[in-house]
Image (cartoon, helix red, strand yellow):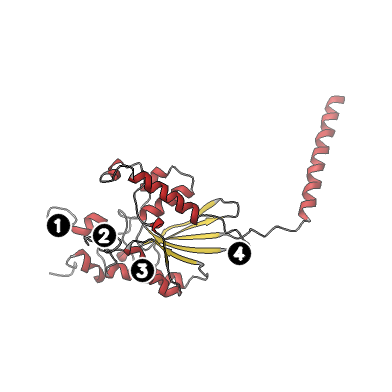
Amino acid sequence: MKRIVTMTLAAMMAIAAVTAAQAQNMGAPRDTAHAGLRFVYLIRHAWYDGADPRDERTGKGLDSLGRAQAALLADRLSHLPVTFNSLVSSSFTRARETADIIGGAIHMIPARDSGLSECTPPSNRPDYGRGQAPGEMDSCQAKLERSFARYVRPAGGPTDLRDLLVCHGNVIRWMVTRALGLDTHVWPNFDIGNASITVLVVRPDGVVRLAAYSDTGHLPATAQTWTGRGAGWSPPPPTDARGRAPGAARRMGVSMPAPPAAYDTLKQRKPSDK
């Protein structure tokens, strides 16, 4: 009996010590020196002319559908009740042109960073490695690791920071898997829309949360273009007499029917045409 009483008294003393420490901490001022959040807005470039044979840094720019998507995206960003602290794009033409349209709407001049340019990192899809030079996918992985460390980091101060990064589907999908602590090889499992918004939130302790993924709410469903069929509401591309989707629609998974602006690149007759 004495042993039981002794153990009970020891436990009570420990609880009392913890309670006293908690009470003392409650009276201390809260440290807000590093309480700000960093919001990283990952923007996928708008639809572009994939049939352009020129290099991605000199050609393959936005067509009229892409410019319409980018304008709608820029309008949405400009009406958000926030102030952006930076605007950076990859060095590829389609990302630069998308960022320039956004910059005009939010009154910012984009910086360029080739570390955000499209590449193909290692994945769970063996077919994605076809056409890649030896070591190219590993170099891509290393580049994306550096970009992640550069941009996805705590704000380091008392105020929130918001950064706009205009880049590419592979880059964004890889960064999302990295942020969530997943095996980055599964990045192809994420579909993503053109001119979409993905948001990562970095807490002061470095923990990263996914706040939004491939948000395309600013685009009409018929103007949305995705990797694959997206969320399912996009109609399938048109098919020819043999049941095949023609041209760019087959290669890029473009949603159809698209608004008239799309037809300068897709080279399709509108459904209403005879």
Judge whether residue 238 can be spotted in this image: no
Q: In which quarter of the image is the C terminus?
A: bottom left
Q: Which sits earlier in the primary sequence, circle 1 or circle 3? A: 3
Q: Which sits earlier in the primary sequence, circle 3 or circle 2? A: 2
Tell me whether circle 3 and circle 2 mark residues in contact (CB < 8 Å).
no
* Coordinates of residue 163 in the picture (x, y in percent): 49, 63
Measure how far apart labels 4 and 2 are at the Cα level. Answer: 41 Å
Q: Which mark is residue 15?
A: none
Measure how far apart labels 4 and 1 are at the Cα level. Answer: 55 Å
Mark 2 highlights which residue? 55
Q: Which sits earlier in the primary sequence, circle 4 or circle 1? A: 4
Q: Which residue type carries mark 1?
A: Asp
Describe the element under mark 3 as helix, strand or loop: helix
Judge whether residue 56 can be spotted in this image: yes
Residue 185 drawn above or below residue 112: above
Q: Which sits earlier in the primary sequence, circle 4 or circle 2? A: 2
Q: Which residue type carries mark 2?
A: Asp
Residue occupying the point 76% across, 54% down: 26
Q: Which sits earlier in the primary sequence, circle 3 or circle 4? A: 3
Q: Residue 159 carries which label?
A: 4
Residue 254 drawn above or below residue 143: below
Mark 1 highlights which residue? 240
Q: In which quadrant of the rendered view does residue 262 lie? A: bottom left
Tell me whether circle 1 and circle 3 mark residues in contact (CB < 8 Å).
no
Mark 3 highlights which residue? 70
Judged by depth in the image, the label closer to the viewer, 3 or 2, is 2
Measure how far apart labels 2 and 1 are at the Cα level. Answer: 30 Å
Q: Which residue type carries mark 4?
A: Thr
* Coordinates of residue 167 in the picture (x, y in percent): 39, 59
User: 87 or 268, which is in the foreground?
Assistant: 87
Q: Which sits earlier in the primary sequence, circle 2 or circle 1? A: 2
